[in-house]
Structures are given as C-alpha cells and as structure tokens.
Image (cartoon, grey):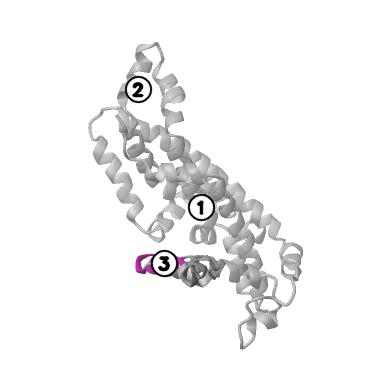
C-alpha cells in the first residue's frame, strides 16, 4: 500500500528529468546549450548594449541588463549621423548585386551544365580558381582597370555605387555560377527533352521547366550574394570617399573611430544592420535549406 501511494505521488521536475535523462541526452543537451549560447549571447549583448549608457558599457563591471530601454543611441544614429542614408546605400548596392549575379550566373551555369563545347570544364574550374584568390589581391588591378576605363568614357570611379556593384560581381559571380551549375546537373535531362519533344523551344524549357525546379538554388545564390554585398567592407572603403555615399559597414567604422567614444551608437548601428539578414533567413529558410542540401535526384 505504501509503495502504491509512493508511485501515485506527483514527481518533481528534477525527478522527471532524472528519469528520462541518459548520459547521451545529457551530453547532447550540454553541447546544444553551449552552442546556442555562443550564437545567441553575442547578439543579445549587441542589442542590449544599444540601450545602455556609455557608463554602463564602459564600467568596470559588466551590465547584462540595461537599467532602462533608452533610445538615445538610435536617436543620435538617425539624427546626428544620418544613418538612414547609409542604409539606403547598402540596399542600393546589395539588391542589384544579388539580382544581376543570379541572372548572369543562371545563364552561365545552364550553359556549363547542359551545353557541350570544348574546354567547358576548364572554363568552369578556372572561374572557381579566381574565387580562391583573396579579394585584396584583386582590388588594385580592378581599381586601375576601372579608373582607365572611366577616364576614357568620362565617368567617375570614386563615390559611384554602380561601379561598386560591378566590383562585387567580380567576387560573387564565380561561386554563384559554380553553385548553380552543380544544381542544374542534378535536374534530369529527360525532363527537358520531354519539353522539347512537346514543342517547347530551349528558352521555354529553361523558363517553364528548369528555373521552377531550381528555385531553392536560386534563392540560396540570392541570399549568399546579398550577404556578401551587404557586409562587404574593403572594396567600399577604397571606392567610397563621401560620407553621404558610405554603406553601413563603412559608416559603422567611422562612428567607431570617432574621437568621442560612442560604443552604444556602434551597437545600435550593428543591430540595425543585422536585422535585414535575420528577416531574410527566416523568410527563406525552407528554400535555403533545400538549395544547400541539393545534390541527389530521386528516380
């Protein structure tokens, strides 16, 4: 009777946890906790610091929770620093870069995956080898080439967002082309051949059959190229001199190097810069996972 009552007594949370926890689950939980903490805590610290005062950030003891949610850093960012202009500049660079890159890469990747011509593999591998070189090695010849072309055609290389988009394409096109070419190879040619037999032209087959099947890969390439252009610092630092033309990474560096320390303003700017990337990942998570995991075709 005593044993029966003991079994009927409600168990505490610790007793339930001890009953269902094994060493494997315990180690997995600990690893997952540290993994998530390593990812989420820096983001939390960035957001919380944007609402702190300079005294709370620069104090001897860390302040994990601000005493109150002060919007002073954001008001200064959009008032004194005119950060909304830099947000617009980043969008004017990142969106065209991602769209142009995916269009050009789609045409080149389809040709590399479907058409047969001499030296195809050599060209594709050579394009990928170019991507392996650090960007700092390409920036000087790119700048010199564009400066010579600009002098002959009459356009300025400095403070020209269109030129900056062109330089970003030099970085993003090779890997975008390689990613899409590998994805197009996973699409069975029999599907396209059936479309051609039914009377479709090659362009109709690409538009109505191949591209709808390649949506996950296309979305992955768009997100990848957008992130590169959104976060790029070195090329923007070289090609942009006017503060009104700065993209967000350059403006954040300017605020950070201001003679008067503004760490809370830097954190506010970094938070704003991070938000669009998080929104894009959450909105396109399904397509992104399918695009990155693509590689097998069911028969």
Nearer to the camera, 39 or 220: 39
At x 64%, y 86%, the residue is 59
| Gap between marks 3 and 2 measured at Cα | 50 Å
Q: Earlier in the sequence, mark 1 or mark 2?
A: 2
Number of marks: 3
Q: Position of residue 299 (x, y in %)?
A: 29, 29
Specify the quadrant of the image occupied by residue 83.
Answer: bottom right
Residue 29 is inside the magenta segment: yes
| Magenta region | 23-35
Q: Earlier in the sequence, mark 3 or mark 1?
A: 3
Nearer to the camera, 165 or 36: 36
Residue 247 in sight here? no
Q: Position of residue 92 (x, y in %)?
A: 61, 47
Nearer to the camera, 25 or 194: 25
Query: Which label sits in the foreground, 3 or 1?
Result: 3
Query: Which label sits in the foreground, 3 or 2?
Result: 3
Left or right: 143, with 53 as reference point: left
Q: Which residue is mark 3?
A: 21
Q: Compared with residue 27, is residue 117 higher up or lower down, i.e. above or below? A: above
Marks 2 and 1: in contact by CB < 8 Å? no
Q: Position of residue 107 (x, y in %)?
A: 41, 32
Residue 148 is inside the magenta segment: no
Residue count near mark 2 (Cα–Cα under 10 Å), binned few <14, some 14–19, many ≥20: few
Residue 227's mark? Answer: 1
Q: From this viewpoint, which residue is outermost toward the bottom? A: 60
Query: Which label sits in the foreground, 1 or 2?
Result: 2
Residue count near mark 1 (Cα–Cα under 10 Å), binned few <14, some 14–19, many ≥20: some
Marks 2 and 3: in contact by CB < 8 Å? no
């Amino acid at each position: 009777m005593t044993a029966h009552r003991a079994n009927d007594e409600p168990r505490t949370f610790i007793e339930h946890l001890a009953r269902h926890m094994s060493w494997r689950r315990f180690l997995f939980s600990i690893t997952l906790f540290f993994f998530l903490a390593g990812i989420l805590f820096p983001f939390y610290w960035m957001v919380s610091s944007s609402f702190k005062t300079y005294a709370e950030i620069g104090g001897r003891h860390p302040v994990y929770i601000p005493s109150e949610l002060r919007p002073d850093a954001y008001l200064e960012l959009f008032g004194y620093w005119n950060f909304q202009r830099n947000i617009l500049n980043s969008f004017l660079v990142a969106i065209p870069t991602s769209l142009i890159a995916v269009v050009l890469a789609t045409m080149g990747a389809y040709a590399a995956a479907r058409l047969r011509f001499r030296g195809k593999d050599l060209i594709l591998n050579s394009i990928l080898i170019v991507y392996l070189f650090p960007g700092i090695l390409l920036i000087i010849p790119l700048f010199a080439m564009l400066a010579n072309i600009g002098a002959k055609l009459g356009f300025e290389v400095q403070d020209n967002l269109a030129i900056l988009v062109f330089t970003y394409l030099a970085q993003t096109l090779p890997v975008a082309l390689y990613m899409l070419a590998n994805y197009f190879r996973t699409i069975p040619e029999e599907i396209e051949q059936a479309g051609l037999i039914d009377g479709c032209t090659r362009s109709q087959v690409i538009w109505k059959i191949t591209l709808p099947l390649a949506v996950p890969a296309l979305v992955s390439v768009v997100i990848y190229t957008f992130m590169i252009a959104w976060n790029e610092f070195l090329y923007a630092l070289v090609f942009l001199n006017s503060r009104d033309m700065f993209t967000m990474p350059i403006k954040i560096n300017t605020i950070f190097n201001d003679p008067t320390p503004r760490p809370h303003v830097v954190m506010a700017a970094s938070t704003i810069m991070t938000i669009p990337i998080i929104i894009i990942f959450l909105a396109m998570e399904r397509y992104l996972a399918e695009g990155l995991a693509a590689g097998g075709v069911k028969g």
